[in-house]
Image (tube, helix red, strand yellow):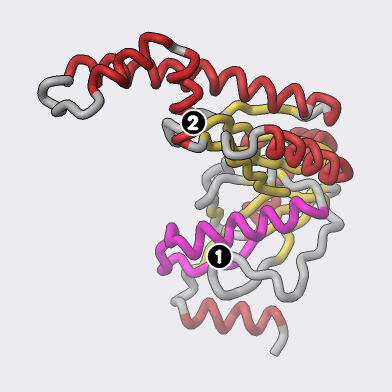
Amino acid sequence: MSTEQATEAREKESGGRTAIYVYGIVPADVEPEEQASGVGDHGVTVVRHGEIGALVSEISTDRPLGTPADMTAHAELLDGSAAVVPVLPLRFGAVMSTAEAVEKELLEAHQDEFRAALEELEGRAQFVVKGRYVEKTILRELLDENAEAARLRDAIRDKSADATRDARMALGEIINQGIESKRAQDTRRVLDALDELKPLVNQRPPTNEQDAVHIAILVELAKQDDLEDALAGLADEWDDRVELSLLGPMAAYDFVMKRAPEG
């Protein structure tokens, strides 16, 4: 069965109600791997216009979007692509009516902007650096450095919560402020360690009160080993104080995320 016949068969099965799901923008010469999977069951193709293209999948308009599997497929396709080619990611849920709409309303209408963005991303990908304090270590550090915190800790030891409510609240406030201060210092320490890589940086808000650092960086893929080495050095320095992790390479969500127009 030809591709055209297969498309006609799928349209017949769904009553002709199909749409095009768009993942992101890539150079026009990109060819998805045959086994590439995405949202839905019809594989991944490229709609092209001039020097740029869009990674897309045909989907039935009857199927709801937004399942965990859909979001995972969206991210995995973009991140896998970003490891080898520049990718301008679109937000999850970008759907247009037809492949022609993708070409005319998305690619042709924004070709200069997209081409410039892809040139900026050439050879680069995003990584996310996250660190979380080891609770017992950071608390000991804060108490050692702050006499008032140590005094309050001693004042509430072995006493009921009701009898020491004010002292506990005061101690909690001191600890929260101390962690915020250390987070700023330790984030700067990470940025200094990565400075030679000349990354673009987006500082993300903490996702947990124990977060020590949470940053997205855009860096050359050729420098991934240097990035890993720099973070390994910090991990040794912060042994049993901060648990560091590195995610990526991934698409440059923090730097060039785009939303597809209605179509």
The reply to whether residue 167 is visible in this rendering is yes
Q: Is residue 200 magenta?
A: no
Amino acid at pointer 1: Val
Span highlighted in magenta in the image: 56-84
In the displayed structure, does residue 191 sit left or right of residue 74?
Answer: right
The reply to whether residue 105 is visible in this rendering is no
Amino acid at pointer 2: Pro
Q: In the structure shown, which secondary structural element does the residue marked by tag 2 occupy?
A: loop
| Residue 206 image label | 2
| Residue 39 image label | 1
**Residue 69 point in image, percent of width and height:** 49, 65
In the displayed structure, does residue 204 sit left or right of residue 83?
Answer: left
Return the disc, 2 or 1, that comes first in the chain's sequence.
Answer: 1
Q: Is residue 76 magenta?
A: yes
Q: Is residue 138 above or below residue 239?
A: above
Mark 2 nearby-residue class (10 Å; few <14, some 14–19, many ≥20): some
